[in-house]
Image: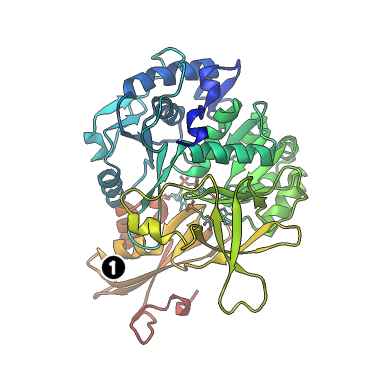
Amino acid sequence: MMASDLSPLLPALLDPPDRVALRFGAPGAIAAELTYAELAAVAGGLAARLAGHGRVAVHATPSVHTAVAVTAALLAGVTAVPMNPKLGQRELDHVLADSAPELVLAAPGVALPDPVAALPRIDVDLAASGSVPDREQAAAGPALVVYTSGTTGMPKGALLSRAALAANLDGLAQAWEWTAEDLLGHALPLFHVHGLVLGVLGPLRRGGTLHHLGTLDAAALAASGATLVFGVPTQYHRLAGQLESDAASATAIGRARLLVSGSAALTAVDHARLRAATGLAVRERYGMTETLIITAARAGDDPEPGAVGHPLPDTDVRLVPLPGDGGEGLGAVEVRGPALFDGYLNRPDATAATRTSDGWFATGDIGRWTESGQLALVGRSATDLIKSGGYKIGAGEIENALLEHPGVAEAAVIGIPDADLGERIVAFVVATGEPPAERELVDHVATLLSPHKRPREVRFTDALPRNDMGKVVKAKLPR
Ligand code: MCA
Ligand code: AMP
């Protein structure tokens, strides 16, 4: 066991400071607020009920109940599987069969989809009080299983250890001078690393405050008094638009210490718009579910739009030259360090495929070093991965869903540039006969998979471009 396994992940829960830990809802419409003492008591009580369990699912709505459920699982030494409450039927069946949770934690009164509803259920009751825990229970398994898409097949569950979470959050605290005094504002989903690990466990590990705003609305963010803000580029793009006609909110948001963007690239145009409105240079950081955060622009660095910062402490990043690179210094990004995942649940084959022969993790991203030693990302090696609004989506998942429709003979899915979402999903379809209505195909995908995976556009075609081997050549699809 590593040394950091022995020290608590959330020390502030064991010796609660006199401070708000969690606040949910827009200012003026706060849905819930818990001080550290209240959170320790309610999560401590729930943890006692979880003792002895192995793996528990969390119906991860963007609510205080999700934050309490995950905190309780960590205190109990139990593995939490945060589940997107909008998963489609295929994904739900897969995630449940793959992760085999013993029970589900959910907010009282929330209806659960089948087959989650068939699991034993414990409601996260904020009124039920336990006692402040005196320690975190030793964990037999990982802290979290976080599902993430690959190019083909169903999402894979990344196993994240307590030691990895602790190391990464401490590295980020150094990079961003993040302390207990910080009030973090964000409006991210709570079933991915960005919103859950950085956005909930981050402030709780520091003993600071999280204010989850529901949506990253300019007036709400301004009124929150956040000193630190996390968001995906789609949220910052929309915020920049709002701030152009809301100078008062722009001034208030400009009093924050740091605006941080990640999960996808923030465009140079949006960097400039946000700086013009708030006076703040957005800091980017880069990571993956499997690696947690790899690089971050530090609080004290000169802003460098287009770069995603320096490697975190104890994290090594190397760029492996690409065949045919004409001296441009581009390379495949590989990483090693204390925050790497422990593999994919039930997928030793897929786990092995991410490792190089000398033990580094191959991210699939392509980058270069800037003159100041920051990493800049220039693309991805897999064209079959789409990033829409910060969500990773495998083209193969959508193609498989489309092929289940009787009206679809062949399908090829790509992401095309989109000012709001970064990329939007376009499906090229060869119909079996008379083409089905576009809406019918879109709804078909949105039922089987999460609604954000539905194509924004379906283009019917007589044939897909193929090479001599019969493989679809996506580069030849009209963009
Ligand atoms: C929502 N919709 C989308 C997306 N989000 N469609 C395509 N791409 C999306 N990303 C659809 C919904 O299904 C719905 O369609 C309609 O848009 C409106 O839904 P709503 O919930 O109102 O969406 P929104 O508020 O506009 O959401 C945009 C968003 C959201 C806030 C940008 O996508 C989001 O929270 N993204 C964050 C993703 C994230 O946390 N990624 C972290 C993973 P319909 O009406 O048909 O239902 S990456 C990670 O963790 C690593 C470590 C990292 O680097 O951070
Ligand atoms: P996920 O697997 O959903 O965790 O997404 C990880 C991927 O998001 C990375 O491999 C990158 O391609 C992308 N990503 C994360 N942060 C950034 C960023 N700041 N700029 C560009 N791409 C990013």
Residue 63: horizontal and vertical position, in percent?
45, 31
Question: Is 423 rendered above or below residue 86?
Answer: below
Residue type, mark 1 in image:
Pro
Question: Which of the image's four quarters has the N terminus?
Answer: top left
Asked whether 476 or 52 is in front, the reply is 52
> Is residue 454 among what the camera can see?
no
Which residue is disc 1 drawn over? 436
Residue 26 located left or right of residue 373: left
Asked whether 326 or 22 is in front, the reply is 326
Which of the 4 image quarters holds residue 467?
Answer: bottom left
Residue 401: horizontal and vertical position, in percent?
30, 61
Residue in the image at 58% along x and 47% along y? 235
CB of residue at label 1: within 8 Å of ligand 1? no
Q: Within 10 angstroms of label 1, few (less than 14), some, or many (20 or more) residues?
A: some
Q: Quadrant of ligand 2?
A: bottom right
Residue in the image at 30% along x and 43% along y? 99
Residue in the image at 62% along x and 40% along y? 172
Residue in the image at 37% along x and 50% along y? 344
Asked whether 165 or 218 is in front, the reply is 165
Asked whether 249 or 372 is in front, the reply is 372
Residue 456 located left or right of residue 183: left
Question: Is 19 rendered above or below residue 337?
Answer: above
